[in-house]
Amino acid sequence: MPKLLVNNREVETDLPLGSSLVDFLRNEMHLYGTKIGCREGDCGACTVLVGSLVEGAMGYRAMASCLTPLGNVVGKHLVTIEGINQPELTVIQEAFVEANGTQCGFCTPGFILSVYGFCLSDKAFTLENVLDSVAGNVCRCTGYASIKRALQVIVDKLQPMDRKNPVQWLVENRFLPEYFLGIPERMKVIALSEEPSMEAPGYVIAGGTDLLIQDFQGAQDAGQVRLLSRRPEYRQIQIQGGWCELGAACTISQVLESRELNEALPGLGEYLNLMASHPIRNMGTIGGNIANASPLGDMCVILMGLGSTLTLSLRGRIRELPLRKFFAGYKQTVLEPGEIITHIGFEMPDGNTRFSFEKSSKRKHLDMATVNSALRITFEGELVRKAILAVGCMGPTVLPLKETSAFLLGRRLDNATFKEANRIAQTEVSPVSRHPGDGDYKRALLRQQILIHFMKFSPHTLTREALA
């Protein structure tokens, strides 16, 4: 029977592995500190820590338990607010209380667990970074000023931490209970359930951030569940010979934290920080974002702009398909019944290649795009040798603008090129208008984004007069 550690207790469960983790915690474990708020991963009230044993040490990530399939935490250490409680308040709890950051208290456990995820990360202890860690948490009483004061206190107290042994330091300094010191040894003997073959029939789940919203009952009722996120071969980032291959179960956080990808694609961290919140980036997968087939998908736009190719698998049969040919219509793909995405690959940019992503939305963070676009250009001197332009939110699917890309070949990026490129691009899109003026507004945003891409690549040949 599948096992996991819940706080300081070893637990077995025979519940369906597609069940929502928050229901397991509340209904089976009776741990009510994990709240149910939106059930869509937006509010952070259900945040927990999930720890995995990697090379003898524990690594912890904050996750939204409402969208986490139970099977994804089997064989791991699951920490709820009850699991960090001690006879007296911990340093983090104390900081929230003294700064009056608790307000009504409903959301406080989620904030606390998110901050613990920050404490156990390798990020620099700055106010900016800890604020990013709680970006997925909502305080319904609008106590953000007091919460920010509490976070500053916590950051200050973390400065002396011994980074070589963070858990030891956190235990000795009243952050964590002592039982955390024994977790690595206990994790070594937790039996993992045997994973069904990915070629076997059954319900396929990766991070769960989409499926547990769209088909909660189907995931829970599924008899056989194939969990991509539990298979190491689908969670790797491999870069070799100028080619990058992402496993379909790689999370947004994995890509965001990849040193090699950030070096090859300056700005990647900034682009991906616009996607969702910290806990959702820790869960949401690259393959899932593509299979969702949303015309708004940020990752789809980025990957299409990079000229990506998908590897698809069906009962041992492997085929490759350019991402630009994957979408068949709104929320529709060319996947055959039972077929899955296993890998996504693209050619790494060389010294002559530039890449840019732009996103316009009502809010800068934690919001869906109004228009997003990506442009990859390889130069030969000042002339364009290769070009790929992809846009989202301008039709039923993420769109490759083939005619615009073809027009750019052999040209210099200047005002005249921009004006003609924009004219062609406008003929390739068909934005949906829900309200009068929506379509015109989106077209104007696309024009601005194309100019921004061009100005990033060749600021000395373009001016704002191109918009005249």
Image (cartoon, rainbow, N blue to C red):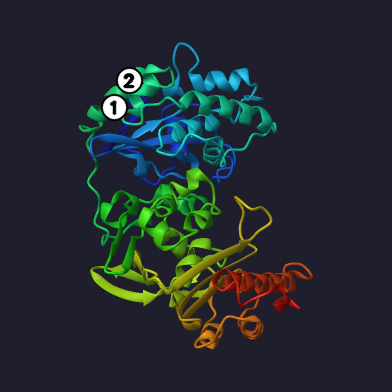
Point out residue 431 in the picture as x, y percentages from the top left corner: 66, 74
Is disc 2 placed on a helix, strand or loop? Answer: helix
- Say whether residue 16 is left or right of residue 140: left
Is disc 1 placed on a helix, strand or loop? Answer: helix
Residue at position x 56%, y 72% in the image:
391
Label 2, label 1: how far apart the Cα atoms are: 7 Å
Residue occupied by mark 2: 179
Query: Is 213 located above or below residue 384 in the figure?
Result: above
**Amino acid tagged 2:** Tyr
Observer-nearest residue: 327 or 406? 406
Quarter holding the N terminus is top left
Residue at position x 50%, y 59% in the image:
267
Q: For the view shown, which residue lies furthest in the top direction?
A: 87
Badge 1 density bin: few <14, some 14–19, many ≥20, Cα 10 Å: some
Q: Quadrant of residue 456?
A: bottom right
Query: Is 357 located above or below residue 120 in the figure?
Result: below
Point out residue 316 in the picture as x, y percentages from the top left corner: 23, 69
- Say whether residue 191 is left or right of residue 88: left
Observer-nearest residue: 29 or 273? 273
Observer-nearest residue: 239 or 366? 239
Residue occupied by mark 1: 183
Q: Quadrant of residue 170?
A: top left
**Amino acid tagged 1:** Ile
Point out residue 103 in the picture as x, y percentages from the top left corner: 66, 25
Residue 384 in sight = yes
Badge 2 density bin: few <14, some 14–19, many ≥20, Cα 10 Å: few
Residue at position x 30%, y 68% in the image:
313
Point out residue 97 in the picture as x, y percentages from the top left corner: 60, 19
Mark 2 and mark 1 in contact? Answer it, CB < 8 Å.
yes
Q: Label for residue 269? A: none
